[in-house]
């Protein structure tokens, strides 16, 4: 899985994209498309919506590339746009009233690399059991490196909101993973007796 921290483009490509060079714009898209999609998929958990967020993010990036001043790396700027798109989706009335098809039939066609280690699969399953807001806070804080103040600001809340969401989510994940391990231990012991 490609992360924003692993991606970069040269200043020349950024300059050429600002001037409207399609090859430079395509280069930026190719470098950052997977991290944007994976971020959206991890927060939203719907591949179709993650694709929409990818499209919306790059529409905004391409529309506003001239406003990018280089105060932070381009990937950080793109990540911030993608996170805002994800959070806007979570706040929308459409999202709150819908039931995604993925809840009915899982989509096995995502571009996200799924872990093959059983412990990672348990974590994947536990993460999907969190509420969307809690999952977003965990992902933004623990994976993307946002501070509680930044997460609170993004969500229109205080930093203590982020801290409490993260603490509750960590406790929920720990409980789920412990329950999963307790279930496996007796099963393994039972199978060793036969």
Image (spheres, helix red, strand yellow):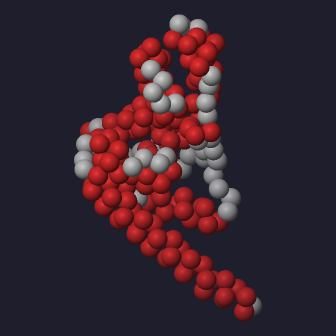
Q: Decide if residue 89 is in sight here.
A: no
Where in the figure is residue 180, as x and y percent of width and height?
A: 53, 74
Where in the figure is residue 150, as x and y percent of width and height?
A: 35, 44
For this rendering, which residue is in front, 69 or 98?
A: 69
| Residue in the picture at 33% in, 58% down | 163
| Residue in the picture at 48% in, 54% down | 142
Q: How many marks?
A: 0
Relative to 117, does residue 58 appear above or below in the rendering? above
| Residue in the picture at 54% in, 7% down | 20
For this rendering, which residue is in front, 50 or 168?
A: 168
Where in the figure is residue 86, as x and y percent of width and height?
A: 40, 38
Relative to 128, does residue 40 appear above or below in the rendering? above
Considering the image in quadrants, where does the N terminus appear?
top right
For this rendering, which residue is in front, 112 or 165?
A: 165
Where in the figure is residue 66, as x and y percent of width and height?
A: 45, 14
Relative to 23, does residue 121 appear above or below in the rendering? below
Extreme residue toward the bottom, this view: 193
Query: Which image quarter: residue 134?
Result: bottom left
| Residue in the picture at 66% in, 88% down | 189
Horizontal placement of 106 versus 154: left or right?
right
Considering the image in quadrants, where does the C terminus appear?
bottom right
Q: Decide if residue 130 is in sight here.
A: yes
Relative to 22, does residue 136 appear above or below in the rendering? below
């Amino acid at each position: 899985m490609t992360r924003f921290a692993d991606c970069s483009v040269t200043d020349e490509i950024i300059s050429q994209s600002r001037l409207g060079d399609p090859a430079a714009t395509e280069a930026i898209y190719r470098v950052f498309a997977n991290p944007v999609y994976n971020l959206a998929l991890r927060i939203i958990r719907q591949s179709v919506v993650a694709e929409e967020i990818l499209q919306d993010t790059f529409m905004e990036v391409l529309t506003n590339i001239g406003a990018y001043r280089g105060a932070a790396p381009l990937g950080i700027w793109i990540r911030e746009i993608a996170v805002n798109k994800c959070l806007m989706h979570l706040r929308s009335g459409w999202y709150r009233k819908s039931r995604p098809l993925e809840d009915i039939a899982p989509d096995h066609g995502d571009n996200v690399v799924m872990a093959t280690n059983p412990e990672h699969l348990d974590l994947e399953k536990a993460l999907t059991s969190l509420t969307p807001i809690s999952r977003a806070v965990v992902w933004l804080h623990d994976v993307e490196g946002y501070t509680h103040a930044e997460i609170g600001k993004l969500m229109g809340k205080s930093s203590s909101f982020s801290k409490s969401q993260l603490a509750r989510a960590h406790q929920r994940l720990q409980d789920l993973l412990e329950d999963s391990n307790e279930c496996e231990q007796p099963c393994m012991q039972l199978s060793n007796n036969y």
